[in-house]
Amino acid sequence: MRKLFLLAAVALLAGLFFAFDLHQYLTLETLQTRRDEFIALKQQSPWLVTGIAFLGYVLVTALSLPGALVMTLAMGALFGFWWGTLLVSFASTIGATLAFLASRFVLRDSVQQRFGDKLKAINDGVARDGALYLFTLRMVPVFPFFLINLLMGLTPMRARTFYWVSQVGMLAGTLVFVNAGTQLAQLESLSGILSPALLFSFALLGVFPMIANKFIQWLQRRRVYAKWQRPDRFDRNLIVIGGGAAGLVSAYIAAAVKAKVTLIETHKMGGDCLNYGCVPSKALIKSAKLAQQMRHGEHYGLSATQPTFSFRKVMARVHEVIRTVAPHDSVERYTGLGVEVLQGFARLTDPWTVEIKLNDGSTQTLTTRSIVIATGARPFVPPLPGLEEVGYVTSDTLWSTFAELDEAPKRLVVLGGGPIGCELAQSFARLGSGVKQIEMAPRIMIREDLEVSELARASLAADGVEVLTDHKAVRCEKVGERKFIVVEHDGHTYRIEFDALIAAVGRSARLKGFGLEELGIPVQRTVTTNDYLETLYPNIYAAGDVAGPYQFTHTAAHQAWYAAVNALFGNFKRFKVDYSVIPWATFIEPEVARVGLNEQDAKEKNIPYEVVKFNNEELDRAIADGTAHGFVKVLTVPGKDKILGVTIVGEHAGDLLAEFVLAMKHGLGLNKILGTIHTYPTLAEANKYAAGEWKRAHAPQGVLRWLEKYHAWKRG
C-alpha cells in the first residue's frame, strides 16, 4: 500500500504539472521574456523566492520532469554565479537522491527478484566500483541524469554514496550551466550552451575517472611490490607450479603461443585426477557395475550368475588404466609441446623468483614475469581421536593400499556422504564389501535436491550399502586387533567394527610450503584471488582446486585458460573468469548430473522458477536397456523457456547434460532443444521430451479453443 501511495502521489504531482501547463515556465523563451519580472519578485521577497526556487528545483528533479536545465539557467540569472551554483548543487543532488530512493522503494525488490541472475554481474560491479561508475556518468551531461537516478536506485549502491558522488560529479556541469544563466540575455538557444566543443570537454572529463582509476591501480601495484627488487630481465615468461589439470592447461596454452614456460611438478604428472581421482575411480566403477549386471542377468533374459574374480586383478586393471592414460599428461608429451618440465618442489622467494628443489637433490632458481599457482588439493582427514591408531585410507591412498589385497575388505566403513564417498561406497559394495557409510548431515549428497538424495540412498541401499545419516563420528578405538569407530545418533553412541576405513569427507587446498605466507598472499581455505584470478600480486595467479570455488577437473582447466591468458597478455586485455555455467556429475548408478540451479538453490536465493520433469520410465531406449529409472528435471524462468538449471538422474546422465550446458552457455531455450532432431532410439531423447513437457504446459489454451471451433466449423 505504501508503494501504491507513493506511485499515486508521484503520478498526481506529475499530472498537475502538465495539467496546469507549468512546463511553459521552464522554457528558455519564457525565462528570457520574464527575466526582469522574476528579478523584481526576488528583490521584493528574496527569501521567499529563494525557497520556492530551491524547492521547485528539488521537485522537478525528484519527479524526473523536463526543465531542470532551464531552471539551472534561471538560478544563474536570478542569483548570480556563486549563490546560484550553491542552490543548484544542493537542490539537484537532493532531488536526484529522492528519485533514487523512490525507485529503490517501489521497484528494486521486484526487479532484483525477477532478474537477479541477469543483474548479478551489474550488482557485483556496483558493489565494487559503483562510485567510480556513477562519477563517470555524472561527468558526462549528455547522458540523461533522470535515468541515472532511477537506474541506480535498482542497484545495491548505498544512498549516502549516491548523494556525495552525485554532488561532486555534477559540480562541473552545474558551474558551466549556472555561468551560462548569468549571461542569459546573450543566449539565443540551448544549443548555444551544448556546443560540440563543450560536449567534447565533458567527454574528456568523463574519461578522467577511468584514467584516475588506472593511476590508482598503478599506485596500488607499486605499493605491493615496493619492498621487492624487480629483476632487470626474466628467465621465463611463465612458471606454472603443479602438474594437474590447471597446471597442464596453463603450460599448454603458454607453449602454444610460443612463450617460454616452465612447469614444476613434485610428484606425478597428471595430478590427482589421473593418479588418484577421476581416472582410477571410474575404472573401479566400471568393474563394479559389470559385476552387478552379472548378478542381475535375468533382467536381460540371461542366467544370473555370481561373479567370481580376483580383487587384486580388479585393482591391477585400475592401475593399467592409469598407465594407459598417463602418456597424455607425461613429461615427454609436454616437453614435445615446448614446455620445460622440472620434477621438484617449488617455493616463491619473491613475486618474480621461484626456487626449485629438484628431485635429484639439486636446486635451481628461475625468474619469471608471471606465475600460476596450481598446486591442487588433498583429501581432508578429520581430526578424529584414535584415527591414526586404527589406520585409514583416503581417496588418494586406497589405490596403492588396496592393490595388494586378494579380496575387497569384508567390513568397510566409508566416512562421508558426498560424491566421492557415495561412488566408493557403491563400488566396494558391488565388489563384495559389507559397507557402512557414515554421514553427519541428515542426508547424503546434501547439495542436490531432496528427491535426488533419496533416490541415491535407495540405489546404494539396493546394492547393500548401509547408509547411516545423522550419525556423527566421535572417535576410533582399537581393541587388540579389532578396529571400531564410535558414532553418535539421536543422543546415543555405539561402536561399528571394521576392517578398513575410507576417509572421504572432502578435500583441502595445498597451500603450505610454497612461499605464499612469506609473500603475504592472503589464503583462507583457498588462495584469495580477484575476478581475473590474480592474487595480491597482479603477476601471480591461482587456478584449480587451490583457487576454488569448485573442485572439478573441468573447472580447473576452465580457470587455467583465464589464468594463462591474463598472465601472458594482461597488459593488453584481461578476462574475468566466467562461472555462469558449471556442470558436474556424481558417477554412482544411476548417475546424477547437474548444471545451474536446482530447486533448493533457487529457493535459498529466492529466485522464481518453474519446473518441468520427464521421467525415464517413459523413454523407449531406457526401457530397452533396462535402465528405465531417473528423470530429467529443468528449471526455467516463469512463463519463458529460458533454462535456469537442469538435474539429470539416470544412465549416462553426465553425457546427456552436455546439451543443456551448451544451451545455457549460448542462451538457447527449451524451444530450440525441442526443435532439434534427436536420433531414435537414444537416451538423449529424454532432453527433447523434457522440452516437450514444457511446451505442453505452456500451450496457448485460448488459441487452441478457437482452433477447436474452427475445425468443428470445417467439418460442417
Image: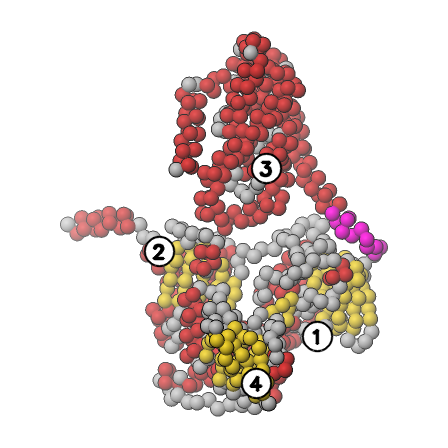
Q: Is residue 713 above or below residue 664?
A: above
Q: CA distance from mark 2 to mark 1?
A: 53 Å
Q: Is residue 120 left or right of residue 706?
A: right
Work out how far the residue at label 2 is from the one at label 4, CA to CA, in angstroms. Answer: 57 Å
Evaluate if marks 2 and 1 touch, with contact meaning CB atoms under 8 Å apart. Answer: no
Q: Which residue is mark 3?
A: 160
Q: Does residue 230 show up magenta in the picture?
A: yes
Q: CA distance from mark 3 to mark 2?
A: 47 Å
Q: SS at mark 1? A: loop
Q: Nearer the viewer, residue 34 or 619?
A: 34
* Callout in the foreground (3, 4): 4
Tag 2 residue: 695
Q: Please give left or right for residue 139 compared with residue 236 in the image.
A: left
On the question of residue 293 being in view, the answer is: yes
Q: Single out the mark in the foreground, 2 or 1.
A: 1
The stretch in magenta equals 220-232
- Magenta stretch holds residue 262: no
Lower position in the chain sequence, tag 3 or tag 2? 3
Secondary structure beneath dot 3 equals helix
Q: Earlier in the sequence, mark 1 or mark 3?
A: 3
Q: Secondary structure at mark 2?
A: helix
Disc 1: which residue: 267
The image quarter in which residue 339 lies: bottom right
Q: Which residue is more in the foreground, 589 or 189?
A: 589
The reply to whether the C-beta atoms of the residues labelled 3 and 2 are less than 8 Å apart is: no
Q: Nearer the viewer, mark 2 or mark 4?
A: 4
- The reply to whether discs 2 and 4 touch (Cβ–Cβ < 8 Å) is no
Quadrant, the N terminus: top left
- The answer to the question of whether label 4 and label 1 lie on touching residues, with beta carbons closer than 8 A, is no
